[in-house]
Image (cartoon, helix red, strand yellow):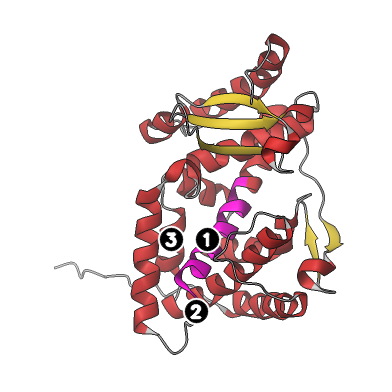
Amino acid sequence: MRKLNSDEINLLNSDLIPFENFLKTNGLLSDKVSSKYEGINFHIESKQELGGANGVARINSQTKKRDIGILDTAMTNDRLRSNVCYHELGHALMGMTSYERTDLEEKVLKHIVEIKNKHPNELTESTHTYLFGFSCLEEYLVEKFAQGMQFLCKGINVPKKQNYSCPPICADYSYWSTMNTKYGIFETICDELVSKTFGNLSTAIRSGLNEEYFGTFFDRFDEKEIMAILGNLGQVFQSIMNYSGNSRPQYSQYSPDKIKETLLNTEQLVKNIQPKVQEINLHRRL
């Protein structure tokens, strides 16, 4: 880890200045967002330090301050650097996993435990597998946020969807994605789920900035149906993490054929799930 040099500071400012202007112009720089954004420290990390990732958002173990690390070789690549910058800012501003957002995580875990206890025979995955389902939804949101900010702030076009496969994770299952990472495995599934939940991506991002994104999935759908989807996404996420070498002891192992079956099942679950009918109270005029 090292500090940015003067050239790197100028490059990063070419991303941050239009980003800040966009938030202000569109009324997105609320007190809540400002409190998260202010005080973030950017620094440079090597490939070895990042473990193969292009960037990271975390609490610095020494200074206890909020940090975003960017891969050293990414700094001079405008598309890659800005994507990493906005992606990690997405985690910082909307995420549950970065900066030890235990308050958000505890709220989500409370919902998961309550619903599991009501449906013990149907919802048999571990609590953390369902929580990892939200990790999928977070990675999806922050990458879509990054792509949108690249276009709106830098004029960098969103990549076109391409057809990919990843046999070590999901056998011969193929998927369409704009993401040049393994997270693209669940992009199209999340496209449909987020569209059904929020109507459009812009609303989902505003919900994320207002810390309403994760809870909305519980509010919008039948709790057992959305938990089944979260459990499946959690299995996929764990498999991606295992494949990427970021596994932890509690991560379960799933075979590629099992993940293919899970993805196909999730496609059908997302296709069939419908938002709950909203009750409207009509008051008769007297």
Q: In the image, residue 28 lies at what x, y percent? A: 47, 34
Residue 134 numbered tag: 1
In front: 181, or 218? 181
- For marks 2 and 3, the one nearer the N-term is 3
User: Could you tell whether 271 is left or right of 180 in the image?
Assistant: left
Name the main secondary structure of what is drawn in magenta. Answer: helix
Query: Where is residue 103 shown, x and y percent of the image?
Result: 35, 50
Rendered-image quadrant of the N terminus: top right
Q: Residue furthest front?
A: 249
179 and 8: which is toward the camera: 8
Q: Which quadrant would the C terminus be assigned to in this image?
A: bottom left
Question: Tag 1 or tag 2, which sits nearer the N-term?
Answer: 1
Going by the numbered disc 3, the residue's amino acid type is Thr
Farthest residue, direction top: 6
Q: Determine whether, in the image, residue 210 is placed left or right of residue 81.
A: left
Is residue 170 in the magenta section?
Answer: no
Q: Name the one closer to the observer, 249 or 158.
A: 249
Q: Residue at x 54, y 63 (%)?
A: 132
Mark 3 or mark 1, whichever is nearer to me = 1
